[in-house]
Image (cartoon, rainbow, N blue to C red):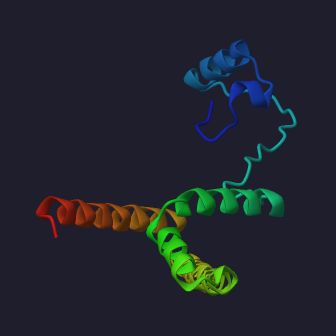
Amino acid sequence: MKLDSAPLGISGITQSEVELELKDSNNFNLTPAIASSVDPVVADSPQKQQSVLVVFGTTFVTIFLAEIGDKTQLSTLLMSAESHSPWVVFIGSAAALITTSLLGVLLGSWIATRLSPKTVEKSAGVMLLVISLMLFWDVLVGH
């Protein structure tokens, strides 16, 4: 049996036929291989296209949970309380978040054309680790 042939379950060749074929090849009395149609095995693409609702929902939940209780939300809360103009603060903070999200999306799509997803993933992990270490150092030193 050749190394580049299909696995037994896919090719339809039984184990005894393989053993016969191997015996024949050891004796140099080669018999023709059993011809059977083999359907190509097509693996799912690793980057399967997701529906718009799934991408939107995942993005919304991720960003929503990440933003709850962070410095931006607390700053917005304080500005709203101090200014007595909650709608103006809401519009200003929403515009700022939309702008930063737009920059993130544009930068992300530019990076995706230049680097492999694995490299982007590793780089993001390293950056988050560095930020975490810096925050830990800041807490440890007590500034």
Residue 51: tell me if it is visible: no
Q: Position of residue 66 (x, y in %)?
A: 53, 60
Q: Position of residue 73 (x, y in %)?
A: 53, 69
Quadrant of the image containing the C terminus: bottom left
Q: Where is residue 111 in the image (x, y as percent from the top left)?
A: 53, 80
Quick check: 22 left or right of 50? left
The quarter of the displayed image where residue 5 is located: top right
Identify the residue at the far right of this view: 37
Identify the residue at the far left of this view: 141
Identify the residue at the far top of this view: 16
The residue shown at (82%, 64%) is 52
The residue shown at (66%, 56%) is 61
Q: Position of residue 62 (x, y in %)?
A: 61, 58
The residue shown at (75%, 63%) is 56
Q: In this view, does 39 lie above or below 68?
A: above
Q: In this view, does 137 lie above or below 33?
A: below
Residue 56: tell me if it is visible: yes
Quadrant of the image containing the N terminus: top right
Quick check: 10 left or right of 93? right
The residue shown at (66%, 54%) is 46
Seen from the viewer's position, the closer of residues 71 and 45 is 71
Seen from the viewer's position, the closer of residues 5 and 74 is 74
Q: In this view, does 53 lie above or below 13?
A: below
Q: How many labels does the image show?
A: 0
